[in-house]
């Protein structure tokens, strides 16, 4: 199998992909109203960051990036748990998971 | 004993009394509070006597006990010690204040014993004595001013002593505010004198006083003394600031006797006598003082003729007699002014206490129309009051005769006086004889008009003893100042008073000796006028009680004018107080509400508007926050990259 194109894929490509994913995620966070979709968008942004970490890790030849990825995944899981709990309680209250109901949480 | 120790006891003993009674101000036992307060003043009196005895023992030209306790303030040129001095003038004052004060405290025990606030009353009374002693003993205008303000405060507290009655509280405020007007002038006077002479010490001021009379109206000495005199018109109830004293009768009667007849109101006279070398060099001020004094003496006497309240009559009489003292100061008869101050303290305190005794007996009734024939029920009060009456109308040889006639003689003879001033004084004496006789007749003589449910009775010994002592003083008090013309005929009796005060009194320039015949004539005329006037009043009010009513009806417009006190209060309200109140209201409405408030509200609204702009930063809208973060990241990144 010709795998030469793999060698032609450099760090830049990974970073560009990560940036695209990040922007897509950010646009989702900024524009969508559904909390579930927002959480997914945040996951997307976190994953784009993870991709950056792994890419840098490979090209720098150390494992720091991999370790950071585990941290990020842990945080992401925790964040998803909290976020979903909030989404559930918002849903119970308003029968919808629109982000604007979160305004009621402000002090 | 050591002089500074004695001085300290004289001054501090009433203060200690004040502190003790002040701490137990809620106690109701009049006997305990009264004993403490009376003892405090009595101790002060005894020490005063010891001081004066030492003073008398000194050689005439060096009579002066000066004590300086500590340096009170030192700023640049202004150096003021807490210094006190007993000399010929203040010696008289402290004897009057503590002596008459002790008697009045004693009287108060009987008079106030059923009052609820009796401990508070005695505390105020002691505080007053303390301040009065500061006033007369202080060796500089500033120490005097402390006492000056202090006695004003105590006067206010005691006039409004029964403050739950709004009328009495208002009388207290009137006294306080009227006095403030005078005090402002007093301060200005102090400033002018300090600017001119660089000191406020009495003896230094008197030493620095110019030797040539100052003719201009706006000269420093004239201006300074004029301001001081305006201050004196406030405290001593002279035109135009006399209106508070009659209202001050709202206070307890012993207070009227102590503060509003014998001591505080004479502070203005005392101050002028203290600074006599300065005043005598300002002939314009002297002229104003003489005219104001004479006018006050006559005006207040006319009002006194129409009053029905026993204390109001005495109050106007006090204003009138103070007018005499100022007349004396104005014509340069400073010794006579002090003399009249002393005799007046005796007989007016006596009469006020006598009226207190009457009011006590009449169950708080003060209207003389509801009295009459009290002679029967109250023999001691009647006899003592009678002696006071003889003294004030100037019958020889009672105390008032000597002092009043010395004033009249000076008014006639002094280069600063004039026959007109003498005539005004004689008119005042005539009017005084009339209204005082009227008061005697309506209160003690004639037919009884006492309501049937009131049973007058003689007052207890605690109240009559001070009356008796003061009555004796009213009779013999004048004998230390017998004029030379009379003294010669009675076997060379010297005029002790004149010798005593001589070193501190500067003679009027160009004073010429008075012919004995003139002096006799003046004396005869004024005594004759007074006696005739008294007889007329006796006829009017005892023999034919209907006559005064008919007479009053026949001159109704004049009578009404006088009865309503010449509408002076109304004029003050219409001309000064109401415009001030309205002006202040307008200031409040246009400046405060419409200008300042609006401006601040406008600034507040502006701030609020600016706040609302940045409020959108804190909506709680998660996506907005995210957008700000996003924009921030983009900005920072683009900055980093573009660099």
Image (cartoon, coloured by chain):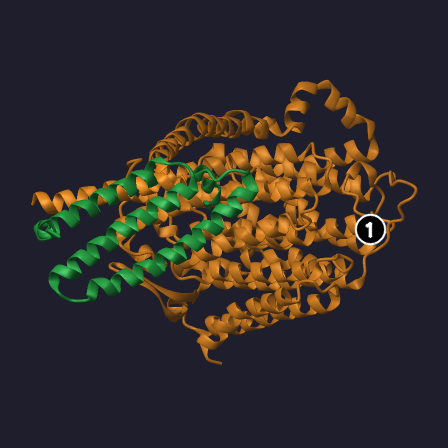
Chain colours: A green, B orange
Q: Residue furthest right?
A: B452
Closest to the observer, B527 or B76: B76
For the residue pair B256 and B36, the one nearer the viewer reads as B36
Q: Which residue is mark 1?
A: B361
Q: Is residue B308 left or right of residue B186?
A: right
Residue B529 placement (x, y as % from top left): 64, 36
Tell me the chain of label 1: B
Is B334 placed above or below B227 here? below
Could you say whether the residue bearing mark 1 is in a helix, strand or loop?
Answer: helix
Q: Is residue B409 visible?
A: no
Tell whether A48 sits left or right of B97.
left
Give the class, few, some or many, for how many residues have Cα within 10 Å of label 1's Cα (few <14, many ≥20): some
- Residue B635 in picture, x, y percent from top left: 18, 42
Is residue B611 found left or right of A6 in the rendered image?
right
Residue visible at 26% across and 54% down in the picture = B198
Q: Which corner quadrant holds the C terminus of chain B?
A: top left
Q: State whether residue B481 is above or below residue B12.
A: above
| Residue A103 sits in quarter | top left
* Closer to us: B332 or B574: B574
Q: Find residue B360 and report its horizontal and vertical position in percent.
A: 79, 51
Q: Give the tally of numbered discs.
A: 1
Query: Could you say which is closer to the camera, residue A20 or residue B298?
Result: A20
**What is the x, y in percent for residue B349?**
65, 53
Which quarter of the figure has residue A73? Answer: bottom left
Q: Residue at x 44, y 75 (%)?
A: B4
The reply to whether residue B538 is visible in this rendering is: yes
| Outermost front residue | A1
x 46%, y 42%: residue = A102
């Amino acid at each position: 199998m010709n795998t030469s194109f793999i060698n032609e894929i450099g760090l830049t490509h990974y970073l560009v992909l990560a940036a695209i994913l990040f922007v897509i995620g950010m646009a989702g966070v900024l524009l969508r109203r559904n909390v579930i979709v927002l959480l997914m968008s945040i996951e997307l942004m976190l994953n784009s960051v993870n991709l950056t970490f792994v890419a840098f890790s490979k090209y720098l030849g150390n494992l720091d990036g991999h370790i950071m990825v585990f941290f990020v995944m842990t945080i992401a899981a925790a964040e998803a748990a909290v976020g979903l709990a909030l989404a559930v309680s918002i849903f119970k209250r308003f029968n919808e998971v629109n982000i604007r109901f979160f305004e009621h949480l402000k002090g | 004993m050591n002089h500074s120790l004695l001085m300290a006891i004289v001054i501090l003993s009433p203060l200690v009394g004040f502190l003790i009674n002040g701490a137990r101000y809620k106690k109701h036992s009049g006997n305990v509070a009264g004993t403490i307060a009376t003892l405090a003043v009595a101790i002060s009196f005894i020490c005063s006597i010891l001081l004066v005895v030492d003073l008398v023992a000194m050689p005439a030209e060096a009579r002066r006990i000066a004590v300086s306790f500590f340096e009170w303030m030192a700023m640049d040129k202004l150096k003021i010690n807490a210094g006190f001095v007993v000399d010929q003038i203040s010696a008289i004052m402290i004897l009057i204040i503590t002596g008459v004060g002790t008697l009045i405290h004693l009287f108060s025990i009987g008079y106030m014993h059923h009052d609820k606030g009796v401990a508070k009353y005695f505390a105020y009374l002691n505080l007053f004595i303390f301040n009065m002693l500061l006033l007369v003993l202080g060796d500089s205008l500033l120490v005097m001013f402390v006492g000056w303000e202090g006695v004003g405060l105590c006067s206010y507290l005691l006039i409004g002593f029964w403050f739950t009655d709004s009328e009495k509280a208002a009388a207290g405020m009137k006294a306080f505010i009227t006095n403030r007007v005078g005090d402002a002038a007093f301060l200005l006077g102090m400033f002018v004198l300090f600017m001119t002479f660089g000191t406020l010490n009495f003896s230094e001021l008197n030493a620095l006083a110019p030797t040539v009379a100052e003719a201009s109206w706006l000269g420093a000495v004239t201006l300074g003394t004029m301001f001081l005199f305006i201050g004196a018109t406030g405290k001593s109830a002279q035109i135009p600031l006399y209106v508070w004293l009659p209202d001050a009768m709202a206070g307890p009667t012993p207070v009227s006797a102590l503060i509003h007849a014998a001591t505080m109101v004479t502070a203005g006279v005392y101050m002028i006598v203290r600074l006599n070398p300065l005043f005598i060099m300002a002939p314009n001020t002297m002229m104003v003082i003489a005219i104001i004094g004479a006018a006050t003496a006559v005006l207040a006497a006319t009002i006194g003729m129409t009053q029905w309240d026993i204390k109001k009559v005495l109050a106007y009489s006090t204003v009138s007699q103070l007018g005499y003292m100022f007349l004396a100061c104005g014509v340069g008869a400073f010794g006579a002014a002090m003399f009249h101050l002393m005799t007046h303290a005796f007989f007016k305190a006596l009469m006020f206490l006598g009226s207190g005794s009457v009011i006590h007996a009449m169950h708080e009734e003060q209207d003389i129309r509801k009295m009459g024939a009290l002679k029967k029920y109250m023999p001691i009060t009647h006899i003592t009051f009678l002696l006071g009456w003889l003294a004030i109308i100037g019958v020889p040889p009672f105390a008032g005769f000597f002092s009043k006639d010395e004033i009249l003689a000076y008014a006639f003879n002094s280069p600063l006086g004039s026959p007109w001033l003498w005539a005004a004084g004689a008119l005042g004496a005539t009017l005084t004889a009339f209204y005082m006789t009227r008061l005697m007749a309506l209160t003690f003589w004639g037919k009884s008009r006492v309501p049937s449910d009131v049973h007058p009775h003689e007052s207890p010994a605690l109240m009559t003893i001070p009356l008796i002592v003061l009555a004796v003083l009213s009779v013999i008090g004048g004998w230390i100042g017998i004029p030379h013309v009379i003294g010669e005929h009675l076997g060379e009796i010297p005029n002790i008073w004149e010798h005593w005060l001589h070193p501190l009194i500067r003679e009027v320039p160009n004073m010429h000796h008075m012919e004995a015949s003139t002096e006799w004539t003046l004396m005869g005329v004024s005594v004759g006028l007074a006696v005739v006037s008294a007889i007329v009043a006796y006829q009017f009010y005892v023999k034919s009680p209907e006559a005064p009513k008919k007479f009053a009806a026949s001159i109704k417009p004049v009578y009404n004018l006088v009865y309503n006190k010449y509408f002076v209060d109304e004029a003050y309200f219409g001309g000064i107080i109401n415009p001030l109140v309205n002006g202040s209201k307008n200031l409040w409405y246009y400046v405060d509400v419409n200008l300042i408030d609006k401006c601040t509200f406008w600034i507040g609204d502006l701030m609020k508007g600016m706040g609302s702009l940045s409020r959108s930063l804190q909506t709680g809208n998660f996506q907005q926050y995210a957008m700000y973060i996003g924009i921030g990241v983009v900005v920072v990144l683009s900055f980093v990259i573009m660099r």
